[in-house]
Image (cartoon, rainbow, N blue to C red):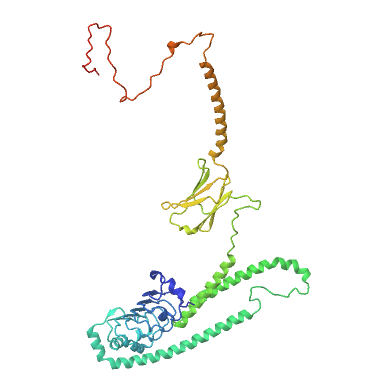
Amino acid sequence: MGRITEDLIRRNAEHNECVIFSLEELSLHQQEIERLEHIDKWCRDLKILYLQNNLIAKIENVSKLKKLEYLNLALNNIERIENLEGCEWLTKLDLTVNFIGELSSIKTLTHNIHLRELFLVGNPCADFDGYREFVVVTLQQLKWLDGKEIERSERIQALQNYAAVEQQIREQEKAYCLRRAKEKEEAQRKLEEENESEDKKKSSPGFDGDCYTDIHADCPSAMENKDHLQVPETQEQQHSTKKSDEIEDDLAFWNKPSLFTPESRLETLRHMEKQRKAQDKLSEKKKRVKPPRTLITEDGKVLNVNEAKLDFSLKDDEKHNQIILDLAVYRYMDTSLIEVDVQPTYVRVMVKGKPFQLALSAEVQPDSSSAKRSQTTGHLLICMPKVGEMITGQQTPMSVKTASESSKEQTKPRRKQVERLEVDPSKHSCPDVSTIVQERKHKPKRMESQPQVEPSEAEPDFDDNPEVPPLI
């Protein structure tokens, strides 16, 4: 059976960030609650409270909810209206399908001056003669009763016949109370009989399902093999007969006619709970513990595992001397559900408890590895540098060697060129001065002087006048 706990209230207060002291609306329907408790201490600011479809037998511990405006207690085991005087701002009360037979108990609601709507349909008192007239006159502040508006003429007419209606209601209440007392005695007697029958079954031999017999006690050696072969068959037969008996008992329970009383509701709930426990016990027996997946064999071999069934790509980046793993993790999955473990010879990623493991072709450096996740695609990118020298570092000794060799090769042509520049005395007796031309040094245009125009010998009539500037 359920109880109102702090954890239960917090789980139903997610809309208020699980804060219960400032909670204004709370829904605790279908929780199999038997008693109202703790709400008036923990949730003083409640305005709306849903408690329908439970097993609450008494209205209690709500008188301190001064701000409560709507209380829903439909489909419970309530037999009397009480303890609501402290709910000063109560405007709507729903008591549909309960067991309220004391209609005079609605007089306690006269103190709730803001009460406008009341639902009592489905209660025994709703079948009383003069029920509506009695409620309309007793609760003058009501505007709606059982979803129907109370008109002024209806209230005036009910006031005229109130004395006779009140007497009639009292007589019907008395008859109902006597009938309820008999129903309670009958329910108590049935409960005691069921408890006695269960105790007898538990105390009877063989209740645990095993068969104990001493038929072959005189000659156990002769029948030992035969009994050993018959044990599995008898166990299967017992299990099948037990299952068939349970099915028959269940059918008999549901086909048995019963009155609609609080006791019958409790009995039905106990039967369903018993069935649920038996089913859970049977499922636990049938449930097999799944062996853990083998990731590394006994001889140390790393296995490739993709239990999460994720797409991936493995790239060997020779330029940066590293291995890159691109794992297509679910886009909207929280990163806290991902665990990355990089080892020298393999990489392992746990995605929501499911392993993804991949053996690497080369040894990597776990300490220098990095893992990043894309914010757009959700992919996980793991970069794992390889162990050893970089590719450029491996080529450095080769480059030094080639440089030394090239320097040696360069010195040889230099020597040859020097020998070629020497004058061969056999070919030239003296140096050829005419071939020696002094190279003209480059001067900037601004520093170069303007060429002087000299008179040509081919023009005899040329007269050089120094006052005339030279031609450009």
Q: Residue at x 47, y 81 (%)?
A: 264
Q: Residue at x 51, y 16 (%)?
A: 421
450 versus 243 height, above or below: above
Q: Residue at x 52, y 72 (%)?
A: 276
Horizontal side of residue 416 vs 445, given as left or right: right
The percent coordinates of residue 160 (x first, y second) are 24, 91
Q: Nearer the viewer, residue 79 or 304?
A: 304
Q: Nearer the viewer, residue 291 or 186?
A: 291
Q: Image quarter for residue 438?
A: top left
Answer whether residue 305 is visible to the viewer in this image: no
397 versus 387 height, above or below: above
Q: Nearer the viewer, residue 300 or 318?
A: 318
Q: Image quarter for residue 223?
A: bottom right
Q: Residue at x 53, y 38 (%)?
A: 392
Q: Nearer the viewer, residue 293 or 32?
A: 293
* Quadrant of the snapshot with the C terminus: top left
The percent coordinates of residue 434 (x first, y second) are 43, 10
Horizontal side of residue 39 vs 194, given as left or right: left
The percent coordinates of residue 236 (x first, y second) are 63, 67
Horizontal side of residue 149 vs 393, given as left or right: left
Answer whether residue 297 is visible to the viewer in this image: yes
Q: Image quarter for residue 114?
A: bottom left
The percent coordinates of residue 189 (x first, y second) are 52, 87
Q: How many marks?
A: 0
